[in-house]
Amino acid sequence: MGQSADILVFTDSEEAKNIINSYLAHGDFFIHFANKDETGLNMISRKEYDIIIFEINQPLFSEVEFIERIKGLNSRIPIVIVSEYFNETKSSVFGNSINEYVSKPFTIEKLINSVNTILRPETSLDSNNGHTELESRKLSILYEMSKSLNSITDFNLLLKIIINLASDALNSERATIFIYDRTTNELWSRVGTGLDLKEIRFPVTKGIAGEVIAKGYSVLTDNPYTHPAFNREFDTKTGFVTRNLLCVPMKNLNGILVGAFQVLNKKEGKFTAQDELFLSAMSASTAIAIENTLLHDENEAKYREMVKLYDDLYTAQNMIVKETKHSTISEIRGYIKQLRQFDNINKVLSDAAANISNNSLNETFEQLKIAHNKIYAQLGGFMNTLLNEVSAESK
């Protein structure tokens, strides 16, 4: 292989595209971007590429299958995987289908090292050693799912991701998670593939999901319309036709039923016992993630309630203090009003002094006036100061 190389990139990330484009400055390379669809596969059929870079953003079985399709079109093209998933399980998931694995965060240094390794013929892996077993890959995907689900705290987002992962892994048209409400003895769901985001509720005695909850075992049927517990109401309202169905119970670590996990209409063939085993395994980790998320939501609700109670208490306390201050101000103003009634004392003393000719008594009256004025001034100043302070605090 010469210095020049054609590199085909499958990615939906603008960030990855920018990093890969910057690689052009480091050598004589031609970068081509492709979509993860039939158009992208046709690009492989029309041209011989030196390297394929494939970014995996979610641990989806369809992503792994797409890589297998790429390898089936041209097994000679080296493949580099860029992902945060399958790092620990890449051997069982991809086998010899890939040549290099680049763990995220994706950097230009990692890309250069991986591509340069592949451009040396002696480092290229033999791609004719067969493929990894399907069930082994599914278990590895299940492992990656479990790791990613436990970090999600938003309930609606968690359900949406679980539904998408289950539909992808089991190749089904629709999937729904039903949560068991023990207080009302109902099943409810807030999300489902092909359904609007709204909550539906029905008694646990209704439908196949209800039967799974009531009896605690899975139901797998290729003709659901003949099943005695099947509820046709949803199909009638939506026009959806259920061809086959798999529903398994979800239990927590203590074996207590949390809900039911249901998938409808396998796109190719029928649901199998292996599908039931896989969905049951997925339901176990799903039940734990759902309980953790519901507990998180419950704690958030209790915290918001506590904050509201504190705010209400603070408001009530301020109102009581304000009312008390207003009452105190009114009382002080009353005392000041009563104090001003003593303004007439000076006049009484002056009139008495004018009517009495005795000098000693006149002197006594003058001393009384002076003493009264001092006391009155001190009391008046004190009351006014107290009134101003209480008024300022009440604002």
Image: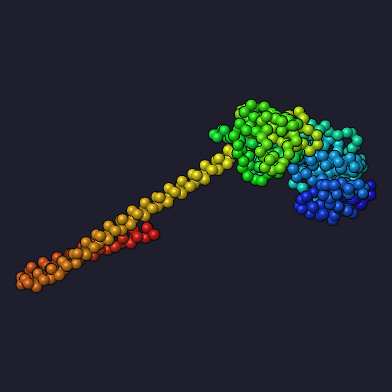
Residue at 83% across, 33% down: 132
User: Percent from the top left, x then y, of residue 154?
Assistant: 63, 43
User: Percent from the top left, x then y, of residue 78?
Assistant: 88, 43
Quarter occupied by the C terminus: bottom left
The image quarter containing residue 210 is: top right
Q: Residue furthest right?
A: 2
Q: Answer yes or no: is residue 380 visible.
A: yes
Residue at 83% across, 47% down: 37
User: Percent from the top left, x then y, of residue 35?
Assistant: 82, 49
| Colour scheme | rainbow
Along the line of sight, the residue nearer the viewer: 9 or 235: 235
Along the line of sight, the residue nearer the viewer: 196 or 165: 196
Residue at 29% across, 58% down: 330
Q: Answer yes or no: is residue 88 visible.
A: no
User: Percent from the top left, x then y, of residue 172?
Assistant: 75, 38
Q: How many marks?
A: 0
Classify 21 as above or below 358.
above
Along the line of sight, the residue nearer the viewer: 160 or 59: 160
Residue at 52% across, 42% down: 302
Classify 199 as above or below 132.
below
Classify 113 as above or below 322.
above
Query: Would residue 127 be found to the left or right of residue 262 on screen?
Result: right
The image quarter containing residue 187 is: top right
